[in-house]
Image (spheres, rainbow, N blue to C red):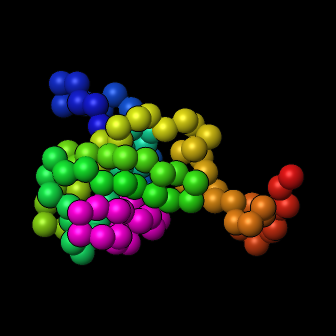
Amino acid sequence: MQLNGGLRQNARKRVLMKAMIIGPHGTHEARVRDLSVCGARVSMERLPPRDGDIIFTRGSIFVAARVGWSTPREAGLEFYRKLDPAELDSAYHPVIQGELRLGPRLITTT
């Protein structure tokens, strides 16, 4: 979440998907509201403290992050490393046991 004069340097895509947050109070399900190569906005029942460290995981994405800001129900996560574009794409199109599911069709990957 690089801020530059109030503007983000990396575009975020608005989404509604689930992820897991591993933090000081255990592992909790979160809803991802937007996502970029540098961070995410999540909502969950029990948020980690501001400036706290967590692990964000969804599909093959497993990345350490810092809580940059939080409200009572949402938090902005700043990833410690930039996601590779293919990693980010995997969040939108998860591979399940060697199969990529897109809509009603089933495509087998090699």
Q: Position of residue 43 (x, y in %)?
A: 29, 65
Q: Position of residue 45 (x, y in %)?
A: 24, 75
Where is the N terminus found, in terms of image quarters?
A: top left
Q: 14 and 21: which one is in front?
A: 21
Which span is picked out in magenta? 17-33
Q: 105 and 47: which one is in front?
A: 47
Q: Is residue 16 visible?
A: no
Q: Is residue 27 visible?
A: yes
**Which quarter of the figure has residue 25?**
bottom left
**Which quarter of the figure has residue 75?**
bottom left
Query: In the rendered image of this protein, does residue 55 appear above or below residue 44?
Result: above
Left or right, 109 with reference to 93:
right
Left or right, 72 with reference to 26:
left
Q: Position of residue 58 (x, y in %)?
A: 50, 59
Residue 22 is covered by the magenta coloring: yes
Q: Residue at x 81, y 67 (%)?
A: 106
**Which quarter of the figure has residue 60?**
bottom right
Q: 48 and 43: which one is in front?
A: 48
Left or right, 76 with reference to 93:
left
Q: Residue furthest bottom?
A: 45
Q: Residue at x 54, y 45 (%)?
A: 88
Left or right, 85 with reference to 22:
right
Q: Residue furthest top?
A: 5
Q: 88 and 55: which one is in front?
A: 55
Specify the principal SS of the magenta part: strand
Query: In the rendered image of this protein, does residue 13 appear above or below residue 74?
Result: above
Please tell me how many numbered marks the rendered image carries.
0
Q: Position of residue 32 (x, y in %)?
A: 39, 60
Q: Residue at x 23, y 30 (%)?
A: 3
